[in-house]
């Protein structure tokens, strides 16, 4: 049977029921917040919803524009506080090379994100990678270094853009 994280590893590149994807993401985070006693305020929830609506990373000011359009104010701290909360609890990841944010594909799973970023359409797919495994984990252990967080980002072409480019 396919696990939730395996199913979502490259969902941004697959056809899927996006409405169900958004609802599932919101439901998962709401349940995690309830279980952990975290406050998912209306602006935090809307910020997460905005990031779930597209499988691409959005900059803080693009998030702020969408929050403003939804009636949540237009001051940058509105977006930054919500993003800080969502990132600090693993519900959202920062895509460093884009200086932008993307909703976590599976916030229930402990993992380090590995992003595949399409350079043409800007879609972002998240693959789940175990923390401190593989060659980097081996090198860190040999050096006596304890990895707390890793982020892997790869730029290239998603299947649709690669197919279009090949045509």
Image (spheres, grey):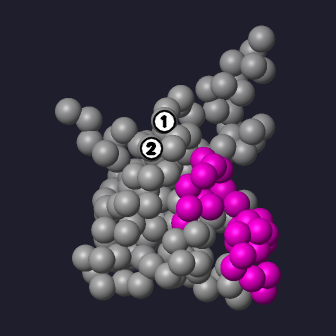
> Is 67 on the left or on the right of 45, as rendered?
right
Residue sitting at x 78%, y 86%: 75
Closer-to-camera residue (137/51): 51
Q: Are marks 2 and 1 in contact (CB under 8 Å)?
A: yes
> Is 111 on the left or on the right of 78, as rendered?
left
Residue 31, x across and y down, in percent = 31, 68
Residue sitting at x 54%, y 66%: 48
Residue 70 lies in the magenta stretch: yes
Q: Which residue is mark 1?
A: 17
Q: Which residue is mark 2?
A: 20
Image quarter where the N terminus lies is top left
Count how many numbered circles sit on residues in the image: 2
Residue sitting at x 33%, y 56%: 130
Please tell me in which quadrant of the rendered image residue 59 appears. bottom right
User: Considering only vertical position in the picture, is 29 above or below 126?
Assistant: below
SS for callout 2: helix
Q: Residue furthest left?
A: 1
Residue 9, x across and y down, in percent = 43, 42
Q: Which residues are magenta?
A: 48-75
Image quarter where the C terminus lies is top right
């Amino acid at each position: 049977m396919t696990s939730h994280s395996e199913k979502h590893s490259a969902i941004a590149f697959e056809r899927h029921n996006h409405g169900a994807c958004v609802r599932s993401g919101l439901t998962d985070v709401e349940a995690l917040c309830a279980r952990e006693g975290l406050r998912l305020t209306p602006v935090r929830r809307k910020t997460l919803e905005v990031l779930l609506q597209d499988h691409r990373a959005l900059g803080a000011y693009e998030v702020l524009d969408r929050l403003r359009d939804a009636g949540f104010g237009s001051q940058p701290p509105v977006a930054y506080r919500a993003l800080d909360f969502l990132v600090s609890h693993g519900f959202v990841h920062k895509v460093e090379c884009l200086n932008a944010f993307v909703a976590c594909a599976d916030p229930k799973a402990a993992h380090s994100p590995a992003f595949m970023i399409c350079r043409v359409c800007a879609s972002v797919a998240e693959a789940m990678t175990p923390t401190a495994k593989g060659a980097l984990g081996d090198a860190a252990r040999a050096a006596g270094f304890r990895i707390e967080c890793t982020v892997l980002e790869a730029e290239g072409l998603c299947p649709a853009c690669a197919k279009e480019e090949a045509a």
